[in-house]
Amino acid sequence: MADASKKKKAKRTVASGQVHVQATFNNTIISFTDGNGNALTASSAGACGFRGSKKGTAYAAQVAAERAGTAAKQQYGLSKADVFINGIGLGRDAAVRALVTLDIQVENIKDITGVPHGGVRPKKARRV
């Protein structure tokens, strides 16, 4: 057992992947995945040190995207990405703009925000 040498894990390179941006009013979460959707790196406004109402700002989303993007570039060599945006928060555009500044080529942007169909259940009839 003392002679057992640990093998170094092969460094995986992912040239093109996906970026999932979840932008709510309270926080923005950015996840970098490979082509199949397996997570590579992730970051959020809260993980970058923003607290309270500052987490929902566009600047916080920009900082989170830069942090996750630099990690994805350094560890996996990510250079191209498809962007999937979910939510209606302030960090939608800021996160995508931050990717462009990191020289990550954005191939296409898709909005996957859920759209209500049928609406909510109506209030029951009032009895007087």
Image: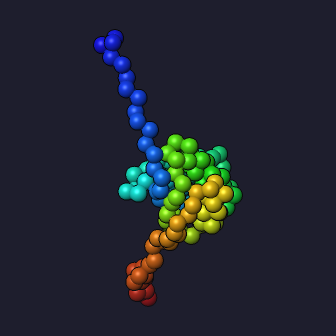
**Where on the picture, by quarter, is residue 60?**
bottom right
- Side of 32 relative to 127 (left or right): right
Along the line of sight, which residue is nearer the eye, 48 or 116?
Answer: 48
Query: Does residue 46 appear anywhere in the picture?
Result: no
Q: Quadrant of the N terminus?
A: top left
Residue, x 60% and y 63% (percent of image)?
96
Residue, x 58% and y 51% (percent of image)?
69
Residue, x 60% and y 54% (percent of image)?
65
Q: x, y percentage for residue 88?
A: 56, 70
**Going by the picture, which residue comes out furthest to the top?**
2
- Side of 22 relative to 56 (left or right): left
Residue 73 lies, with reference to residue 36, above or below; the image says above
Residue 16 lies, with reference to residue 73, above or below; the image says below
Q: x, y percentage for residue 82?
A: 49, 63
- Side of 113 relative to 99 (left or right): left
Along the line of sight, which residue is nearer the eye, 124 or 47?
Answer: 47
